[in-house]
Amino acid sequence: MPELRLRGGPLDGLSLQYAVQGRGPVVALVHGLGSFAASWGATMEALSGRATVLALDLPGFGRSAKPRVRYGLSLFTEALDGFLDGLGVGQVSLVGHSLGASVVLTYALAHPGRVDRLALVAGLVPGFPYRLSPIYRALALPGVGEALALCGCQAVYRAALARCFYRPRAEAIEFLVNCDYAARTGWGARAAYLSAVRAVRDDFAAMGPDCRRALRALTAPMLMIQGRQDPVVPAAHGHAVAQELPRVEVRWVEACGHFPQIEHSDQVNGWLSEFLVARPAPR
């Protein structure tokens, strides 16, 4: 994977790893908590015939640098901005999965003129009610989270990921567990994961109604794709977003968990391709 070092600003010198494929208007893919750039493989393939598709490892994840910092939404959006600047990208369409949806929405609020289109896949939308699961609430507790992180191993990760799928496929689970396993499970990566859980919990608590009002003002076309049986970002969260943001185009996927782009690859990536690169953005 290529590497890019950020220049200037608070993240000067930070190393980001990324994947790139195709040629045309730029689409950037942003993964969720605990995921990584290569998890977008099928989506990159679907979009690359008509777009330049970028997928980055966010700071603290995948092969990217893992400094000892607070991994909140501001860090992730600053990293995304520096990444796009470093590659000379002007206009961009953004796709965010899970927590990645929070990142791309926060970025769009800060840089509305730069974003052509937004797609949220099993997206966690800031400013809307969301309750962490019991395991994430435990991970957020000082000391308890560190003790649980020490227990992480392939069998634990495999079981946790399988719960995210409506119908787990062994090959998909094995890829998500084993790809760059050492880089993604060293203590630096585990510390970054815990920091992200805690920081994003606090960010969500602070954003509230002001964020909802700001999101209503976004003019970029927006697509939301949500699995009906998602155990991580439940359907109720998606319904709340759809009711509050009526301009959002919503696609529901039946018999689908938290990874629609993997579990229903052809259908979901076809929708993304149609929305992102088959129709020009309005001016």
Image (cartoon, rainbow, N blue to C red):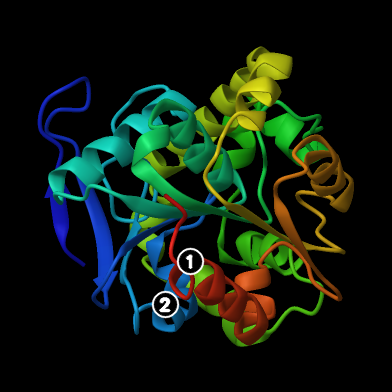
Quadrant of the image containing the N terminus: bottom left
Q: Nearer the viewer, residue 200 or 220?
A: 220
Instruction: Decide: is 250 above or below 277.
Output: above
Instruction: Decide: is 91 above or below 102.
Output: below
Q: Provide residue 189's location: percent of width, then percent of height.
A: 40, 44
Residue designated by label 2: 47
For the residue labelled by badge 1, is the local secondary structure a helix, a strand or a loop? helix
The residue positioned 54% from the left and 50% from the top of the image is 32
Q: Quadrant of residue 215?
A: top right
Residue designated by label 1: 276
The residue positioned 27% from the left and 78% from the top of the image is 22
Q: Provide residue 236's location: percent of width, then percent of height.
A: 89, 46
Left or right of 228? Residue 81 is: left
The mark nearer the N terminus, 2 or 1, is 2
For the residue labelled by badge 2, is the local secondary structure a helix, a strand or a loop? helix
Left or right of 32? Residue 182 is: left
Q: Provide residue 42's location: percent of width, then percent of height.
A: 48, 80
Name the amino acid type tagged 2: Leu
Q: Quadrant of residue 183?
A: bottom left
The residue positioned 86% from the left and 74% from the top of the image is 254
The residue positioned 10% from the left and 33% from the top of the image is 7
